[in-house]
Amino acid sequence: MTKLSSLFAVFAMLSILAIGGGTPILPEMQYWTVERFHWLTDRQFRDIYGLGQVAPGPNMLMVLVIGYKLRGLAGALVVGIAFFLPDCFITLFAGRLWDRFRYSPWHAAIQQGMAPIVIGLMLAGTYAIARLSIHNALALGLAVVTCGILLWRHVNPGLLVLLGGLIYALAPVHHLIPLN
Amino acid sequence: MDSEKYLSGMQSEQAPRGRVSLPALFQVFLTVGTISFGGGAIAYLREYVVRSRRWMSDEEFLDALEVSETLPGLNTVNLSVIIGDRLRGALGAALAVAGITVPGAIVVLGLAELWEGPLNSPRVGMFLTGAAVVACGLLTAVTLQLGRRQLASLFDLALVGATFAAISLFHLPLWLVLLLLAPVGIWFYRPTSGRLQVAKPKVKGPTEPSGISVIRR
């Protein structure tokens, strides 16, 4: 049985490392939950990520499902506290100190210097999910079309998620061409 | 000092407001937490907090957004902390975070329960895979939009590539990647006496996608 303390430690660590949001920590989350602790399989990780796309609110509430799957409501609660509380405290106190730092020239240096790293981490997070989910031409097509539509104009991504999920669920599974 | 001028300028632009009541604050964040399917919670928050309730000016909102993007954590949650804190202190921050996360938490746990039980079928698994596939397209679009500037500069592009390679190819732990590469980026953009960069208050256009804000030169 998964220890609640391990769940807490892993998600508190991910919380503190979440520079640039949730996507940048996806590879790290996959490493700890799948490869290191074997709490989930790759497929479960992917499906839970997909589940998180269907919910309103912050886009990483899927972490609660990981806790729930392992230890029920107590697991969900522990993961929720570990994943959200550290960042909330950091933001509360740093937000109050912000004004002193705002006009420091280092502020600009940190923002400009960190931006490429965050973009690289977001690409790595996207790649981690793509590696788990894009296994055939239909999936590749859906991802490319989604990206194209969203770059072209503003559409509610929630609608695209529902539509894409339905298309994929109704596709003739055994006739999909695997990507090599 | 320029900064003082900007500060006073910002203060004069504050939206007129009385004391926001805690139930009203909670209600707004609960509403946004319930209706913001497919992300976009930040846009909904701006709609309520700035436009409909006039609790903050656009400048204050964008300033809060910038802080929330710079600090670790999910942007939506960090933004809720800062808005809640600025309106009603720590208790306001706690209620804002509860409001924005609890509805989605109930939905996601409810779906997980259904998925384990009555909805446990290969088709549902396919649906979730499809949702993850669409999310890949979405994340790619968001990353390209946020990274327009980074993908156009040679140094930035090299750092983007190094970060991606360190994580996805060499599987280095995230803390190590941050420890190695953050100083490189920050040192490259370090303030020098020759080109002293004083960050001026940025007024972003309302259509600008939320994400990492970078100071434009």
Image (tube, helix red, strand yellow):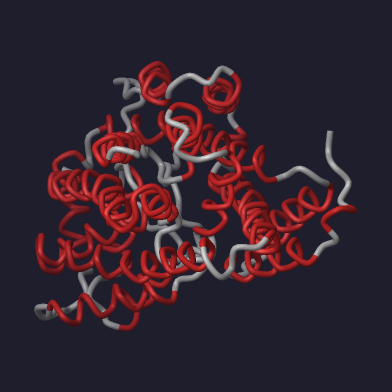
x and y percent of residue B83 in the render?
23, 63
Front in this rendered view, residue B198 or B36: B36
| Residue found 36% across the figure and 49% down from its top | A67
Q: Quadrant of residue A104?
A: top left
* Count of numbered labels shown in the rendering: 0
Q: Is residue A3 visible?
A: yes
x and y percent of residue A32 in the render?
43, 31
Q: Quadrant of the C terminus of chain B?
A: top left
Front in this rendered view, residue A30 or B63: A30
**Residue B160 vertical position relative to residue A163 in the rendered view, above or below:** above
x and y percent of residue B93 in the render?
17, 62
Left or right, B217 with respect to A7, comes to: right
Q: Is residue B198 visible?
A: no
Front in this rendered view, residue B89 or B101: B101
| Residue found 22% across the figure and 61% down from its top | B10
Left or right, B62 with respect to A148, comes to: left
| Residue found 39% across the figure and 24% down from its top | B178
x and y percent of residue B24 in the render?
19, 82
Q: Quadrant of the N terminus of chain B?
A: top left
**Residue A97 vertical position relative to residue B107 in the rendered view, above or below:** above
